[in-house]
Amino acid sequence: MGEKQQFDGWRNAVEPALDSKVDEFHLLGYERVTKDEIWDCLMYELRKPKEFIHINQFVNKLLLLKPQAYMNWLTVKAYQDPTDWFADFEKDAQS
């Protein structure tokens, strides 16, 4: 039970499932989704459970990742790291 998760070590092993999930999101209209974003979203989703999961359960969670969970993750990420999108325009206007 007290075993440490090895998610980063599984990244190469689950690459085909990751590619499949990215393709699925692209087919659903989320063309800007990348493998890194899907991976980060999955890591965010898996931060809560404390029990050890096996690689087959990990791949299952990856393949069952819903677009709603991805969009929620993007929203949380945007609130945590607010970007001033107009800072560059304001610099140009003042020059």
Image: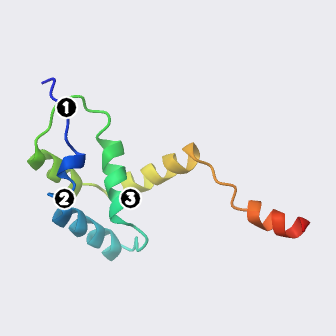
Relative height, residue 92 to residue 68 (above, below):
below
Residue at the image point whose x is 19% and y is 41% from the top: 6
Label 3: element kind? helix
Which label's residue is closer to the chain start, 1 or 3? 1
- Checking the image for residue 37, the label placed there is 3
Image quadrant where residue 11 sits: bottom left
- Return the x and y of residue 54 as percentages of the image width and height: 10, 41
Residue at the image point whose x is 82% and y is 64% from the top: 91
Q: Nearer the viewer, residue 34 or 49?
A: 34
Q: Closer to the observer: label 1 or label 3?
A: 1
Amino acid type of the residue tagged 2 in the rendering:
Asn
Disc 2: which residue: 12
- Checking the image for residue 63, the label placed there is none
Which label's residue is closer to the chain start, 2 or 3? 2
- Checking the image for residue 4, the label placed there is 1
Amino acid type of the residue tagged 3 in the rendering:
Glu
Tell me how far mark 1 sits from mark 3, CA to CA.
23 Å
Q: In the rendered view of the protein, which quadrant contains the N terminus? A: top left
* Label 1 environment density (alpha carbons within 10 Å; few <14, some 14–19, many ≥20): few
* Label 3 environment density (alpha carbons within 10 Å; few <14, some 14–19, many ≥20): some
Label 2: element kind? loop
Which residue appears farthest toward the top when viewing the image? Answer: 2
Image quadrant where residue 48 sits: top left
Which label's residue is closer to the chain start, 1 or 2? 1
Residues tagged 1 and 3 counted as in contact (Cβ below 8 A): no
Tell me how far mark 2 sits from mark 3, CA to CA.
15 Å
